[in-house]
Image (tube, rainbow, N blue to C red):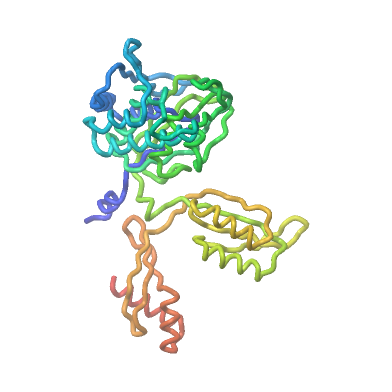
Amino acid sequence: MGNNQAIRERTMRVAYFDCFNGASGDMILGAMIDAGLSFATLRDALAGLGVGGYTLHAEKVSKQGFSATQFTVDLDPQAHQPHRHLSHIRKIIEPADLAPSVKDRALAVFQRLAEAEARAHGTTVEKVHFHEVGAIDAIVDVVGAAIGLDALGVERVVSSAIPVGSGVIHCDHGEMPVPAPATAILLENVPIAASPEQFELTTPTGAAILTTLAEQFGPVPSMTLESVGFGAGHRDGRTRPNVLRVMLGREVDASTESDQVAVLEANIDDATAETIGHACERLLSAGALDAYCTPIVMKKNRPAVKVTVLCKPETVEDLEEVLFAETPTFGVRVLRAERRKLEREHVTVQTRFGPIRIKVGRRGGKTVTASPEYDDCRAAALDHNAPLRTVMDEARRVWEGQG
């Protein structure tokens, strides 16, 4: 198998939703159609729901000079559109003539949406009336998004931070501030972005789709870009075009070559070296990927250190607690970053000093570096009363001799 073929087999199709002016169900579908989703494929697949009373349209429009596709669900005014519970929506989706992956994605979105609505209204998931969200246009948006991702072969969804807008909205319960209560609940633990636009930029349906299906939120992942699409909303923005952009491409498996990390930083000028050393040990034992210090000069020309911690995003709060408990800092900066890393593998080689593990780093199927493990070499050097450098050189020689 050639290297190019090996690389293709380790890549996946990714969709990056760039929500620079919010997100809604129709904008998500419009963007996917603009990026290559066949409207006929979408329409025919939605017919498998067995629900009528609507027609679909997709047309090219211009939003402040930018071309985009506007997706619209036109409801038949004569058709009855009842309020639905989650159980009613399950009865529509589960027997439908749709791929299992499409059903799973759509039902997961509605489950999350029902849980958010239940919290917002102080009731149970089973008793939630979906109101507008349970109407056929929202069902089309949610199921259509799942159909679109499946038809485009998308295996992984990533989203930008999500702007929510400002002002108030009018709903069945009166005026509510933006974001709407259910939208705010859906966006918990998700990065949101400020915007000067004075209306609701992200709808509950758009928030439910993205927060359910996106694996992560942040910058554009590394990918070979294949197509770009713009989906238009039904309003005109005051300061920016009311569109959502989707970028489709092939990404190297993020689990092996890139991931998202958090960077915690604290400047400290009033702690002893023992305190800082102990804090770094505690950070590493609490799950930090790395913890280190950099000499700096702070205000009033005071010598100080900057403690830097790399960690997984889900461990930020735990490691902040360690920093505040073990150092005198009054503040911790938290940054998000994409970490590029080599695919790693440990290979054991047999040397005259015994077995030594070699940490091998690869990129794109090609070996980039190979390093003997220090702990193995140190133990072997002590056991054989040999210099550490000799043991490490021997391990490298054996590794290189094995090709």
Residue beneath the point at 32% across and 76% down: 349
Quadrant assignment, res 37: top left
Task: Say which quadrant the C terminus sits in.
Answer: bottom left
Quadrant assignment, res 225: top left
Residue beneath the point at 38% across and 44% down: 223
* Residue 106 against residue 397 in the figure, above or below: above
* Residue 371 against residue 355 in the figure, above or below: above
* Residue 274 against residue 74 in the figure, above or below: below
State whether residue 27 appears in this view: no
Query: Picture coordinates of residue 42 (x, y %)?
Result: 28, 27
Tell which of 3 and 255 is nearer to you.
255
Query: Picture coordinates of residue 359 (x, y %)?
Result: 38, 68
State whether residue 54 appears in this view: yes
Tell which of 30 and 61 is nearer to you.
30
Query: Picture coordinates of residue 371 (x, y %)?
Result: 41, 70
> In the image, 356: left or right of 269?
left
> In the image, 152: left or right of 307?
left
Task: Say which quadrant the N terminus sits in.
Answer: bottom left
Specify the farthest residue to the right.
Answer: 300
Residue beneath the point at 57% across and 27% down: 177
Quadrant assignment, res 329: bottom right
Residue beneath the point at 25% across and 51% down: 5
Specify the farthest residue to the top.
Answer: 78
